[in-house]
Image (tube, rainbow, N blue to C red):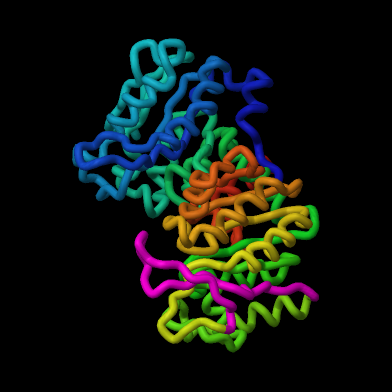
Amino acid sequence: MNFIRFQTLCEQGKAKGQRVFIRADLNVPQDDSGAITEDTRIRASLPCIRMALDAGAAVMVTSHLGRPVEGEFKPEDSLAPVAQRMAELLGPKYAPKGVPLLANWVDGVTVAPGQLVLLENCRLNKGEKKNNEELSRKMAALCDIFVHDAFGTAHRAEASTYGIAQYAKTACAGPLLAAEMDAISTALSNPKRPLVAIVGGSKVSSKLSILKTLASRVDQLIVGGGIANTFLLAAGKRIGDSLAEPEMVREAQQVMDLMRERGAEVPLPVDVVVADEVSSLARANRVSADQVGPHDRILDIGPKSAAQLAEIIAHAGTIVWNGPLGVFEYDQFAGGTKMLASAIAHSDAFSIAGGGDTLAAIAKFQITDQVGYISTGGGAFLEVLEGKTLPAFEILARRAQG
């Protein structure tokens, strides 16, 4: 995928003295008092900001936060807590006087080379969500270089993510977005074979298009969670009171048929872990996939199934992971996901993982450093797996052509 990299512009000295507008993803969780409870996204934005300041640029950064009503400012919608935390993380070298937060910035911003300002919540601007042309052109006029560094918003064509990229003098990808684009290209556009995809979660219906797209391109398609239960139904197995979608059995069968036509397969569990309730106190029982009782709930795969999947992972060239294999939040139902995580960690394959539950599993089983690339975008990552071209990728590729 051809696109301009902000890092390259900085290395070539083309950012020096220029007005640089960075669209970051600073949409961090907050408690009821407005205090930031987890700052990963702020930390992830810092390399691009430091890069711009080191290059001698005049730096403007903005982001959305929450779901504000356009044109109606409320204190809880403000990026003020983000500005404070960003200043703390950047330290006196990059933010000697803190990080100024500017409101009503669309019609003009004053910032000097070597300085950084944070622009108030971009979703407060009327026309942001609908990618209003007038708003987009005003944003573009603020800068010489637009830097998209927010993969979590790459699937949205909004004024601060797409429109500004259309009209800015130069539009490029920041280091975070560039890394995502490179990783996705490695995993899906030109993968080392065998390509193994793992898709977990509760519903086939919410990931049907992903499953069908993957079934046309992967060598092994592993399903987990409630999705696997629906596939078990499609294979004629009894699943008791397990979470499943009986109305999606036909679609699951179609996915298995697609794989079979290509000489591939969807390996189904041969043993499972069941209980009569989903709780930390539930008693887990391991049974054959043919021996699930009428009131059993399948909450994890069994050790034989996990070992089979680990063997598949061991021979993979590329691994794409989205979703756990069971209710891993409870230790008695975490065995399948834990073994899968371990297999990925020990694999020589290039691995890319994304999705909230997947990231939680990666953190729980402490394999962050063993995964090739961890995607920061939930919805954007899923749309890439569906085979869609993200708006951010499309516009940056088009602008790179001149």
326 is higher (above) or lower (below) than 359: below
Q: In what quadrant of the picture does the C terminus appear?
A: top right
Please state which of residues 96 and 145 is positioned toward the viewer in this rendering.
96
Please state which of residues 147 and 149 is positioned toward the viewer in this rendering.
149
Please state which of residues 192 and 231 is positioned toward the viewer in this rendering.
231
User: Which residue is at a point 78% across and 60% down the rendered structure image?
Assistant: 194
Residue 274 is a magenta residue: yes
- Region in magenta: 263-290
Q: Main secondary structure of the magenta part?
A: loop
Residue 83 is a magenta residue: no
Question: Could you say where residue 239 lies in the image, as x and y percent from the top left?
Answer: 50, 82
Would residue 305 appear left or right of 277 to someone viewing this image? right
Would residue 209 appear left or right of 123 to someone viewing this image? right
Quadrant assignment, res 37: top left
Question: Could you say where residue 46 lies in the image, as x and y percent from the top left?
Answer: 49, 27
User: Which residue is at a point 46% across and 52% down the rendered structure image?
Assistant: 356
Question: Could you say where residue 395 lies in the image, as x and y percent from the top left?
Answer: 58, 48
Please state which of residues 108 and 88 is positioned toward the viewer in this rendering.
88
262 is higher (above) or lower (below) than 23: below
Quadrant assignment, res 31: top left
Would residue 133 appear left or right of 339 to someone viewing this image? left
User: Which residue is at a point 43% across and 56% down the rendered structure image?
Assistant: 329
257 is higher (above) or lower (below) than 87: below
Question: Could you say where residue 365 lies in the image, as x and y percent from the top left?
Answer: 53, 46
Name the residue at the bottom extreme: 236
Would residue 160 appear left or right of 97 to someone viewing this image? right
Quadrant assignment, res 99: top left
User: Which residue is at a point 60% across and 60% down the rendered structure image?
Assistant: 385
Q: Is residue 190 visible?
A: no
Q: Is residue 119 visible?
A: yes
